[in-house]
Amino acid sequence: MSRRRHSDSENEGSQPHKRRRTSEPIEIEDRLESLICRVGEKSTSSLESNLEGLAGVLEADLPNYKNKILRILCSVARLLPEKLTVYTTLVGLLNARNYNFGGEFVEAMIRQLKETLKNNLYNEAVYLVRFLSDLVNCHVIAAPSMVAMFENFISVTQEEDVPQVRSDWFVYMVLSCLPWVGKELYEKKDAEMDRLFSQIEGYLKGRVKAHAPMLQVWTAEKPHPQEEYLDCLWAQIQKLKKDRWQERHILRPYIAFDSVLCEALQHNLPPFTPPGHMPDAQYPMPRVVFRMFDYTDAPEGPVMPGSHSVERFVIEENLHCIIQTHWKERKTCAAQLLSYPGKNKIPLNYHIVEVIFGELFQLPTPPHIDVMYTTLLIELCKLQPGSLPQVLAQATEMLYMRLDTMNTSCIDRLINWFSHHLSNFQFRWSWDDWSDCLTVDPEKPKPKFVKEVLEKSMRLSYHQRMVDIVPATFAALIPAEPNFIYKYEDESASSLPGYPASITVGNAIKNRATNEEILAILKEVPNPNQEDDDDEGESFNPLKIDVFLQTLLHLAAKSFSHSFSALGKFHEILKALTERDEGKLHILKVVYEVWRNHPQMIAVLVDKMIRTQIVDCAAVANWLFSQDMAHEFTRLFVWEILHSTIRKMNKHVQKIQQELEEAKDKLEKQQHKRQKDSGDEEDMDKNSEDEEGQLEEQIERLQEKVESAQSEQKNLFLVIFQRFIMLLTEHLVRCETGSVEISTPWYKNCIERLQQVFLMHHVTIQQYMGTLENLLFTAELDPHILAVYQQFCALQL
Amino acid sequence: MRTQMTEGLDIEGYYYNAARCLCLQGNRYDQEKLLKQSHTLYVGNLSFYSTEDQVHEIFSKSGDVKRIVIGLDKVKKTACGFCFVEYYTRTGAENAMRFINGTRLDDRIIRTDWDAGFKEGRQYGRGKSGGQVRDEYRQDYDPARGGYGKLAQQHRPTEARNSF
């Protein structure tokens, strides 16, 4: 496993193929990096003796490798936060041996902190500040100067006209250090700390928490309230304070070295003014703490720390850090999670499963790609086959039982996780335990969940497998066989108006007729929409599309590749047929009709048609919201298509924007070059002027392209939100006039899907807030719908 | 030496390391370069019955899939247990190497490896009998890959003969 990642900045673009010169300094630097990165991992010697030894080695190397050592230590402070106390101890030992080095390290850390804040790397900044605060425990930094830094951070809460997320973050940073250093700071500076506390308390009381409902995984408060993250941390710190800062979970190697460390001279932190608010700052989003277990869930063995215990915070923090560090390498990640120090005192498997699901279900989006969590859980099951699968099964059972109040976006992720997980374990599951889902309204979350799981599971296997794995009683929930439905299948369809043409077209295609010949055939297809001959030209003829597409897709139904090939081969005809919006809408309708038992195929065909510009994104949105698709509106595949469509639109805009940026850069470089070379031969000047002219033209063209793409993107969101508003308003009005309960399964799905659009594409949507507010989300809107918009705005206030 | 060659690839490939001596196109340096920029993966140890649909479903979990080419027996023109998956982005392929490689499809552990890119002709097995080379010589019985290896099949008397 390469540790090289930490010192990526050190590899100055060296060609990896060049055989490295076996010069000593580089070898020693690598060795130092390796020694430092590996300290604290499994070893035959004790951690203390390893630290002692390493401190000696580094001290000896300081004269020649001081800068390298500084850089490595700063990197591990930033990138290996789960090993915080190991490295603070190391720095403490070095400081005891070499006061100047300690001072230089602190300065380097402050520089690094400034850099991370400047670059919106807020998570890393928290780790750095935590590191500095733990250095107080190692007698490297004087407590009063740390308190002063905290005071500066908290003074941010007094700033006016700044986003709440900014001051939130500074408060979070201070509070999250206290499990490590609260005791020491209170012992040295209790009056100042008390003042700090009351300032924080006042701030927290005045915070707006409109965003919280949008981020909660469950709408129910029981069995575990999902607290807003700052509220939870505050409760945990207050409890810790009440317990007189007695905290027994954090591994503190420096305690063993107390006699050495307390002899060391401490440094004062330079006064640190938090950088001011910049308009382009991207502070971390607020969070809700995910809890699914408590002490009653772990049957035997160590007890799970309570939800407001600081131990719970530290454990969760450390486990999140381990995942953050090792997510790309699942075997290492699993091993690191399972070798968490102090694991014998806690029900580690439960914590791990809770933290992993917490990330998977995190709103707006998980920190890492969904599939990582699936594979990580599989690795964990492999490493702990006697215990982890049972905890995972227990968790799955609990999640199933609470589906009724689970956020729809989270249910989506649960469906994808569970089906993928099962496919790795021969789909073995105790389905009978879930037979309660068979007796309720099939639109309710539980039966819907099982249905979607079986549909996804079928995609990873085949229809008969689904029949085999579930009890016979579940037959109604098994998906249909994914077969093509051909309207013009046989003679029983001969009365249909398109039947004769379908035969002709089919033969034409099989005999490799040219596009012209086929278009000629299609011209003869009667138009059900017009009564008599239309001399003014063709009005829209849906039957043409129907006959051609049904026949073509029928011939190509064998596989995705066959269908893609068909779309490609007859692209010209398809473009002609879908020139108008009605054509685009109708082609989507036909695709659905023929493949309605194979949603996966519908999705890939729609994707292909967008990419080859047979349909556009707005057409897809309109189709999904159309009356024809109303009966499928709560099915997962509909939303997967919609989100995929939005993503394609976003990527398209980004691509053109990037082309524009590149062209601008090129022009700039060209202009610089010309200025430098000016005065040389006239010819060269003329040539470069021409080039510049061309570039300027290109930039103008790209500029137009970007504007047009952005306009299309804005229009797409307008269409989508408009349709949501129409559907929801209709429902709300109907319920009100009929005095009927609003909250039907359909309504819950629809309103949460609206939320989902905001959350999944929040970065893009931020650009269009003004338009959305002026045109759509006005004060006249039903408060239920407006609330979603307001909660979304509250996320970055 | 191996670290140098795979440095930057970041994710170890199984088949690449075994097959690199067979690389026929260009010299080794070019091959390295192609792999480091590649958006295409070779996928091995598939069941003969695994479909494009299944491959698409699982590999879509790491990114948008541009194209899948199912490997075919050169003689029979039926699936013979491998395929190529091409992504629109490098990240999609990297995440597949990280999170789909070594997990199951159709109950079999599948293996992915970087590929220099699909070219016409590469969709066919290169074993003498038309399937993959590995199915020529293996001795075990694998019902999802045509039963016994081709060589072993020749030495094995058929069921029919035995029943007399």
Image (cartoon, helix red, strand yellow):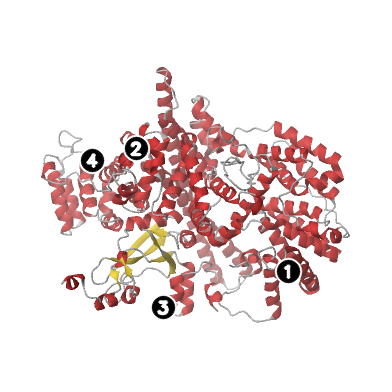
Image quarter hosting the C terminus of chain A: top right
The residue wearing badge 1 is A68
Between residues A352 and A156, which one lies in front from this camera angle?
A352
In the displayed structure, B53 sits above or below A591; it is below
Secondary structure under the numbered disc 1 in the rendered image: helix
The amino acid beneath tag 1 is Lys
Side (left or right) of A762 relative to B117: right
The residue at 64%/70% (across/down) is A12
Rounded to the nearest angstrom, the CA distance separating label 3 from label 2 is 50 Å
Q: Which amino acid does label 3 sit on?
A: Cys
Q: Callout 2: few (<14), some (14-19), or many (20+) C-alpha neighbours within 10 Å? A: some
Tell which of A599 and B143 is nearer to you: B143
Q: At which x and y percent is residue A461?
A: 34, 54
Q: Cα distance, mark 3 to mark 1?
A: 40 Å
Q: Are marks 1 and 2 in contact (CB under 8 Å)?
A: no
Quarter of the image where the N terminus of chain A is located: bottom right
| Residue found at the far bottom of this picture | A22
Q: Going from the N terminus, do you reach mark 1 or mark 4 first?
A: 1
Residue behind mark 4: A542
Say above or below: B148 vs A700. Answer: below
Residue located beneath label 3 in the image: B23
Using the image, name the chain to which the residue with label 1 belongs. Answer: A
Can residue A425 be seen at all in this image of the molecule? yes
Mark in the foreground, 1 or 4:
1
Number of numbered labels in the structure image? 4
